[in-house]
Amino acid sequence: MTSQLSRRRLLKILAASPIALAAGPLTAAPLAVWRGQALGAHAEIYFAGLSEDAAASLFERIEATLVRIEMLFSLYRRESALSRLNHQGRLDAPPPEFLEVLALASAAHHATGGLFDPSVQPLFAAHAEGRSGDSAARALIGMEKVVFDADAVRLEPGMALTLNGIAQGFATDRIAALLRDAGLVDVLVDIGEIAALGLPEPSQIGWPVRLPDGQLLHLRDRAIATSSWSGTMVGSTGHIFRPDGLPITDLPLGVSVLHKSAAMADALSTAAAVMTQAEREALAGRGVEMIVAGESTPAKLTPSS
């Protein structure tokens, strides 16, 4: 998890780019494209079968939604809900989206045996500030100590959260839902993590997405997120920390997770990036679909039954 650094992975997914589409044109139909910023990262959305003019009103709604999400989860903005929570240790009357992300984070925390833990923010800050000892910071870690309900979110003294390991995925899901509710069926949303809806005609296999190791997938009605421990360095260490303090060794170049939810894919890939091989195998055994950089994968990825 990261703090004042972009969550966009150094080993990033390339979606609908000239590299990914080198084999041929994406679609013979009109293709509208929105580009902008979201949570400190470049974002792109592709609308198959829609002209730029027809998509203009949707562009405005997308931008308004992303501004709201930024004001919830940004660690850059002092006035964001997350910054106020970290500063005050309490957030009264939290917005529903904030509670939704905390509930998703708690589910990911449980699914990964505690390896996904937004409360590692003090540890990240210690490393970012060059403090050699992190025992005090580690004593503050514990997602189970975060209490939240409709009345308030409460942290113990000294605790702080980073939701950077899940917020981009949540933003991706929220924009995908907005577009689905608007009646669009063939869309690719790339807001740090990727959600693919429908098919870009004349394709019959899905949206082309290239992983960091060069593998080309065709994604349909699924989300995908990729994390790498060394994608961003914090001092002499990677930007993702194991809350349990165990050494991080023999790590893959990157781990991609596929899920119906981009938020869950984001969180699970973050944890998987610092897992041992045995831990990744156990997570896969519980039904999590992942691709480890360098391993083969099917070219067509459609919804699971």
Image (cartoon, grey):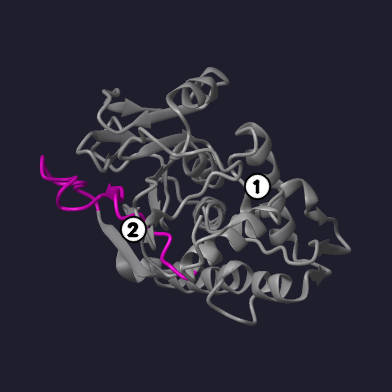
**Horizontal and vertical percent position of residue 304:** 49, 23
Which residue is most to the left?
A: 23
**Horizontal and vertical percent position of residue 70:** 55, 71
290 or 63: which is nearer to us?
290
The disc placed on residue 201 is none
Circle 1: is it few (<14), some (14-19), or many (20+) Cα within 10 Å?
Answer: many
In this rendering, the answer to whether 42 lies above or below 20 is below
- Pointer 1 residue: 105
**Residue at 47% across / 26% down in the picture?**
280
**Residue at 55% across / 57% down in the picture?**
167
- Pointer 2 residue: 50
- Rendered image quadrant of residue 297: top left
Q: Which stretch did the figure color magenta? A: 4-29
- Rendered image quadrant of residue 111: top right
**Tag 1's secondary structure?**
helix
**Horizontal and vertical percent position of residue 187:** 39, 50
**Residue at 35% across / 50% down in the picture?**
230
Give the residue type that dot 2 points to: Leu
**Horizontal and vertical percent position of residue 283:** 54, 25
Whichever of labels 2 and 1 marks the residue nearer the N terminus, that label is: 2
Which residue is most to the top?
A: 285
Distance, label 2 to label 1, CA atoms, is 35 Å
302 horizontally vs 183: left or right: left
Give the residue type that dot 1 points to: Ala
- Rendered image quadrant of residue 221: top left
In this rendering, the answer to whether 131 lies above or below 241 is below
Q: How many marks?
A: 2
